[in-house]
Image (tube, rainbow, N blue to C red):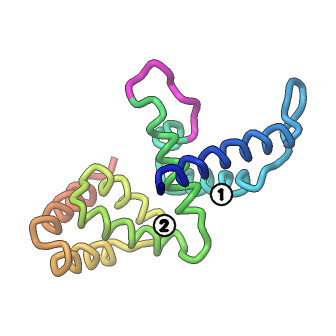
Amino acid sequence: MERRAFLAAGAAATLSATASSAESGAGPGKEPRLQPGDEKRERAREIIRHMFPPQNVAAMDGPVRTGRFGAEFSQLAFENAYVQLWSRPGLGLRDRSLVTLGILIALGNRDELREHLSAAIRNGVTRQELEEVIYHATGYAGFPLASSALAVAAELFNKPAA
């Protein structure tokens, strides 16, 4: 029964989205009207441009490169993380960075942690605060995961300046 309700809700959302597209005035030779989600999407674009290097931004905000394995993955990250979460009111980018770092440390996600440590600096988190986040993680995520995060941060911060 729950599955049917879920499927019905999905179908209703699809019909609603189709109707919205038709009502937007989009069509050959016509500019689409600004939709409510477009402002969030623009805010998300500003956020990723601020947080990440150009190659990361191009991957998330560029066209889907068809024919590649997982071609839509970057766009899913953009929509789910940056349009839906990072662009929400209530927490600033600095605070969201701190929360994200704690989660990534607890998950042991070294690759994403590396990217988000650099982004946190761009969002106003200090090196000392990053150290404190890692120290704090020892009590909640455990020493092995915090130690792994420390290694990622040390690699990032101990690089010679180019």
- Residue linked to disc 2: 123
State whether residue 50 is above or below residue 54.
Answer: below
Q: Give the label on residue 43, or none.
A: 1
Measuring from the top left, give residue 140's x and y in whole percent: 20, 78
Foreground pick, 82 / 133: 82
User: Which segment is the magenta one?
Assistant: 61-69
Spatial separation of the CA atoms under disc 1 and disc 2: 15 Å
Q: Is residue 155 left or right of residue 10?
A: left
Q: Who's the residue at 50% across and 25% down the image?
A: 65
State whether residue 55 is above or below residue 122.
Answer: above
- Amino acid type indicated by mark 1: Arg
Q: Is residue 61 left or right of residue 110?
A: right
Measuring from the top left, give residue 12's x and y in whole percent: 67, 48
Measuring from the top left, give residue 100's x and y in whole percent: 38, 66
| Sequence-first disc among 1 and 2 | 1
Instruction: Classify residue 30 by image quadrant.
Output: top right
Frontmost of labels 1 and 2 is 1
Q: Would you say the magenta stretch is mainly helix, strand or loop?
A: loop
- Amino acid type indicated by mark 2: Asn
Q: Give the label on residue 31, or none.
A: none
Q: Is residue 10 left or right of residue 127?
A: right
Measuring from the top left, give residue 157's x and y in whole percent: 27, 60
Q: Who's the residue at 54% across and 47% down the image?
A: 7
| Magenta residue check for 67 | yes
Q: Who's the residue at 30% across and 62% down the image?
A: 104
